[in-house]
Amino acid sequence: MNKEKTIFDYLNNIYYKKGIVYDKKVAPAYLISMWLSHDNKLNDIVNTINEFQFFLPDNLIYQYYYYKVPSGNRFLKWVKKEETDKKIKEKFDTIRKEMCLSKIEMSKFMGFVNVLENNTTKTKKKTKNASSLFL
């Protein structure tokens, strides 16, 4: 029973050294690099080859990872949305509907709001003492 290989088979091959023959059509080296870069312990290994990513053949990059990445289990931390993210999204959806803005217009509006917030925080940081706040 031959099942089709996926990128996860090739990642497991790198982690557990199973000796699977690499197929760049299934798992391009760039995609493997992206997955490996999510593991903080492997960042040095990924960053070393990253500058050569588009100049070296995929199979050479895969071999580099195969021999450089230490054997063992890898568990990537899955980031979940927090409740505050949901509340903020609901708040902005309400504002967007009240102002009759499209999602694109709302994203531009949010960019403008972020710029304003960044500028006001920068000016607040420049004050050296409490008396300068009242001038």
Image (tube, rainbow, N blue to C red):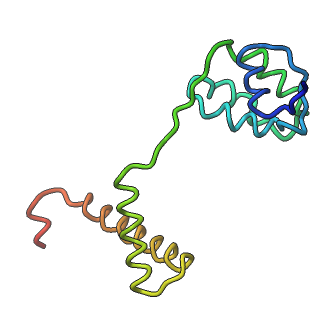
Q: Residue at x 78, y 39 (%)?
A: 30
Please determine whether, in this image, residue 123 is positioned above or below residue 61.
below
Measured from the top left, where is residue 16 in percent x and y? 72, 14
Residue 110 screen position, x and y as percent? 45, 72
Q: Determine which quarter of the picture holds residue 127.
A: bottom left
Is residue 131 left or right of 61 when viewed as pictured?
A: left
- Residue 129: horizontal and vertical position, in percent? 13, 57
Query: In the rendered view of the protein, which quadrant contains the N terminus?
Result: top right
Horizontal relation, residue 47 to residue 59: left or right: left
- Quick one: 106 or 20, which is closer to the camera? 20
Q: Nearer the viewer, residue 100 or 37?
A: 100
Tell which residue pokes out farthest to the bottom in this image. 100
Name the residue: 42% across, 69% down. 115
Is residue 87 depicted above or below 3 in this figure? below
Residue found at x 10% / y 71%: 134
Q: Residue at x 79, y 19 (%)?
A: 66
Identify whether 59 is placed above or below 135: above
Q: Could you tell whether 54 is left or right of 117 in the image?
A: right
Query: Quarter of the image containing the C terminus?
Result: bottom left
Q: Point out residue 107 in the picture as x, y percentages from the top left corner.
A: 51, 72
Among the 4 quarters of the image, the one containing residue 9: top right
Which of 39 and 86 lies nearest the eye of the viewer?
A: 86
